[in-house]
Image: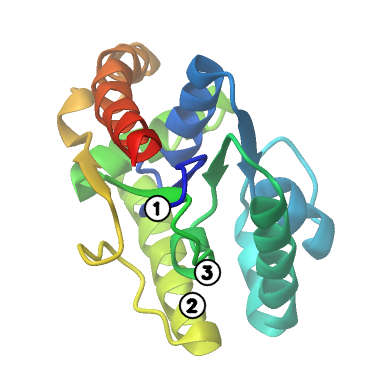
Amino acid sequence: MARKNKVLISGWTAAGKTTHARLAAAELGWTYLDMSPVMKELTAVNGSRDWTPEQDDIRRRNRAIDIEADRRMLEMVSSGSSIIVDAWLQPWLYRSASAVRLWLGSSRTARTRKCAVSGLRHHEHLSGRQAAKVIRRKDGFARRQFARLYGIRFGYDPTLFDLHIDNSAYIAETSIAASDAGIREFQPVLMRRLEALLEAGSRR
């Protein structure tokens, strides 16, 4: 069996993929790889945010952007090792057994709170209703786009993912302090489960 030297993290909008992928990469001393710079380059939408509604509008009009972005990401994943990958579709597109596929689950309530907190970190004030709307829009676009392009039914699939871990309970309210506390509390939980899988894979 192939040595596990990649971790592919996926999940719905505002599940915490980027935050926990970056922290996991830092703790393991691995390389962090994400789709955001590739998508920014291909859509020519820059700025401090990893995602904007404008990006999805551009992608909707030109589906070739997603195909090229996924091709570039797959090439980087295939050519690297000891990497943590934050990209929605890589668990489906990267076929090698050298990867641990991790689905980061989070309830709609928790994701709405995290989306609003993300706005606060960028000095934007989103109401709960506005944050929920952002989540619905982004989730819906991703679901439709991935189905059209690849026939993929995006979501947790127990036959594909090696680890499903849920962080819904780790944000008690919509505040940066609560979010930071939840991140600190959840990250060790995630790392224990992830490191156990990596260690088991390395022994086979």
- Height in image: 85 above or below 63? above
- Residue 104 location, x and y as percent? 31, 44
Q: Residue at x 45, y 42 (%)?
A: 4
In the rendered structure, which disc, 3 or 2, sits on the residue that comes first in sequence?
3
- Residue 183 location, x and y as percent? 34, 19
- Residue 139 location, x and y as percent? 40, 64
In the rendered structure, which disc, 3 or 1, sits on the residue that comes first in sequence?
1
Residue identifier under label 2 = 146
Given residues 36 and 151, the one toward you in this image is: 151
CA neighbours of label 2 inside 10 A, class few (<14), some (14 to 19), many (20+) = some
In contact (CB < 8 Å): disc 3 and disc 1? no
In the rendered structure, which disc, 2 or 1, sits on the residue that comes first in sequence?
1
Q: Residue at x 65, y 62 (%)?
A: 74
Marks 2/1: CA–CA distance: 30 Å
- Height in image: 157 above or below 11? below
Colour theme: rainbow
Residue identifier under label 1 = 1
Q: What SS does tag 3 mark?
A: helix
Q: Tell me the kind of residue under disc 1.
A: Met
CA neighbours of label 1 inside 10 A, class few (<14), some (14 to 19), many (20+) = few
Residue 89 visible, this angle: yes
In contact (CB < 8 Å): disc 3 and disc 2? no
Residue identifier under label 3 = 93
- Residue 2 location, x and y as percent? 46, 51
Q: Nearer the viewer, mark 2 or mark 1?
A: 1
Given residues 8 and 107, the one toward you in this image is: 8
Q: Residue at x 40, y 51 (%)?
A: 13
* Residue 40 tag number: none
